[in-house]
Amino acid sequence: MPDSSPGQRLRTGRLKLNKKQVQVAHEIHKASSTYKSWEQNRARPKTFQDIINVCAATGISIDYYISGVECETKLTDNQQRAIDAVDGLPEEFQEIFIKMLEDMAEQLTKT
């Protein structure tokens, strides 16, 4: 069963991080009135990038924000490090890097 509303989930995440609404708004480059309206369920983020940003700033997952149900699968620290490393690369290098990893994994599983 979903937990509360999207706005309440943002608020709960923000409070767990001891942040003020104005801090979150500043982090996601939105007016504090915009972020406040999201918490109060008077409006919703307009783009997926806004959802990504607000979830990161409030420490909640996108799954949890959208559905109210926390995803059961958690990333290990190494998995998150790999994602962060790839994410920092230009897009054209991301594909190359992923292909390299896939090839390495295939070679390692053959031995």
Image (cartoon, rainbow, N blue to C red):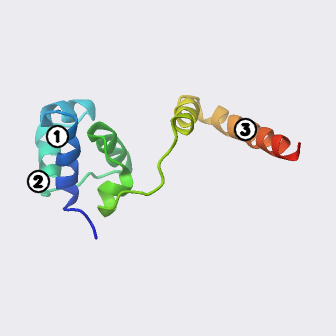
Mark 2 and mark 3: Cα distance apart in space: 43 Å
Tell me how far mark 2 sits from mark 1, CA to CA. 14 Å
User: The N terminus appears in which quarter of the rendering?
Assistant: bottom left
Q: In which image quadrant can residue 90 be found?
A: top right
Which amino acid does the dot numbered 3 rest on? Leu
Q: Secondary structure at mark 3?
A: helix
For mark 1, give the secondary structure: helix
Label 3 packing within 10 angstroms: few (<14), some (14-19), many (20+): few
Residues marked 2 and 1 touching at CB (< 8 Å): no
Element type at mark 2: loop
Q: Is residue 110 above or below residue 87?
A: below
Residue sitting at x 60%, y 36%:
91
> Which amino acid lies under the numbered mark 1 shown in the image of this protein?
Leu
Mark seen at residue 40? 2
Label annotation for residue 101: 3
In percent of width and height, residue 107 lies at 85, 41
Q: Name the residue carrying label 1.
A: 15
Residue 60: x percent and y percent?
Answer: 31, 46
First-in-chain label (1 vs 3): 1
